[in-house]
Amino acid sequence: MNFDLKTLSPAQAAEFPADALLVLVPDTLPKGSSPLHTLAAQALKGDDLEPGVGKSLACYRPEGIKAARVLLVRAGAADAVSVRKAVGMGMTQLKAPGVARLAVVFSLVAADADGLRAALQICADASYVYTTTKPSAKPRALDKVTFGVSDAGAVRAAFETGKAVVAGVEFAKEWANRPANHATPSRLADAARQLGRLPGIKTEVLGPRQIEALGMGAFLAVAQGSAEPLRFIVMRYQGAGKADAPVVLVGKGITFDTGGISLKPAAEMDEMKFDMGGAASVLGTFAALAQARPAINVVGLIPTCENMPDGKAVKPGDVVRSMSGQTIEILNTDAEGRLILCDALTYAARFKPRAVIDIATLTGACVIALGAVRSGLFSARDELAQALSQAGEEAGDPCWRMPLDDEYAEGLKSNFADVANVAGRAGGAVTAAKFLQRFATELPWAHLDIAGTAWRGGANKGATGRPVPLLLQYLLNEAARPAGKARAKARASKA
């Protein structure tokens, strides 16, 4: 999809050539005499445009306006939350095949950067269509969206960031939505190599022999039941000096999860193709970095494999040795994500990172705790947890900090290994995080459990692309910190 940003007064918006205008109407309409002012004022005066954010009135060929379709939508205070809801409601009414060019008009409201980004992202999300393995699907009808604001220069940076977020979210959606036979570990590695051709990004892919040489016994154990060979993807984005410590993103890449020998129930098992949502979000974040180009270094680590119940598969009770040297008793083979992540966390230490964030569709317990609204956030580092929480709020991709009390680790004790891979049912999201924490004790580490936010089920089944917006915002914020600004200035002086 193509996006454009223009300075448009209400009078200019009325003359703008588009198939449809989506006009945001504030609670208090500013004075003016343009056709848009007149139309909105009449709709409000006649009570045809009901109170409430998202309430709308559709008009066809109104007098003095060039676009054939005009949709007036209440935007309340026009903050980011209100704009997201208003534009989202409006987009449901503008999915007609004849609407290829849309203008979202902010000219009657006081547009800010957050509101513009929210509008851009919801336009992309509402018009997204998955077509890769569905030839009968009609491609996205909407081709171009122009955002008309009172001063394009004032919000240009936010607009460019919004475009980068959309690029990243849609890349993540594409790969998470693909069926498991179209998104194998090898194909996921090919997607990473594709990103490695973009400016500032390099990709390396390791195979089974290299993983064995590294001593990643936990990762190998999960992969051994599948005919598909594992892959370990290492990506680097170089936006700052080589001496600058990177942020490391670790994405769980289980391209299909049967549960292994601890087989899952058949109902809704098809949704386990989404179990690589963490990996997809790392890929998407790198796609966004290639556009946003912040002055920061980022490493992406993606351990990816299938979890299958083959005769060679790991069994409940088996003990494996992780890369860290710690042994693990695998009491439940369906708790496999933490096994591949623990080895990747050990590997992450070699980069001497400023922060390590793992992202995983890890536990159904997190879905019970937080539903589909907020991702679960776990970290013993207050500054890192606060930075991620703030980024999530800014990006409209919120998370919620969960506890990490030492007492939660009691259930992970084993008589036959250093640690068991599961505890009891109680506090399952927390005990999973406590397992991972054992492998990141010396790292500035955070864990995002996205089991409830990475995809939707039911009639609207599909990937959401979360938490790409949160991750990119966090990286942008880190790059904008005083040290990051100094690096950016130094880099610019050398150019």
Image (cartoon, rainbow, N blue to C red):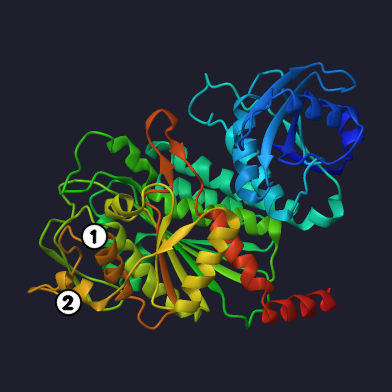
Q: Foreground residue, 253 or 71?
A: 71
Q: Quadrant of residue 19?
A: top right
Mark 1 vs mark 2, foreground winner is 1
- Residue at the disc numbered 2: 418
CA gap, disc 1 and disc 2: 19 Å
| Residue on which the image places disc 1 | 428
Amino acid marked by disc 1: Gly
Residue 143 is situated, as x and y percent measured from the top left of the image, at: 72, 30
Residue 183 x, y percent position in the rendering = 43, 42
Q: Do tag 1 and tag 2 residues touch (Cβ < 8 Å)?
A: no
Quadrant of the frame with the C terminus: bottom right
Of the image marks 1 and 2, the number of the one nearer the N terminus: 2
Say what secondary structure mark 1 lies in: helix
Spot occupied by residue 257 in the image (x, y as percentages of width and height):
29, 46
Left or right, 146 with respect to 287, comes to right
Q: Is residue 359 left or right of residue 72?
A: left
Look at 69% across and 49% down and name the residue there.
115
Does residue 297 appear anywhere in the picture?
yes
Decide if residue 206 is in sight here.
Answer: no
Pick the residue in front: 254 or 152.
152
Q: Is residue 61 shown above or below 44?
A: above
| Amino acid at circle 2 | Asp
Please rate how many residues cluster around mark 1, counting C-alpha atoms within 10 Å: few if below 14, some from 14 to 19, many from 20: many
Residue sitting at x 57%, y 47%: 169
Can you say which quadrant of the picture contains the N terminus? top right
Residue 135 on image: x %, y % = 52, 22
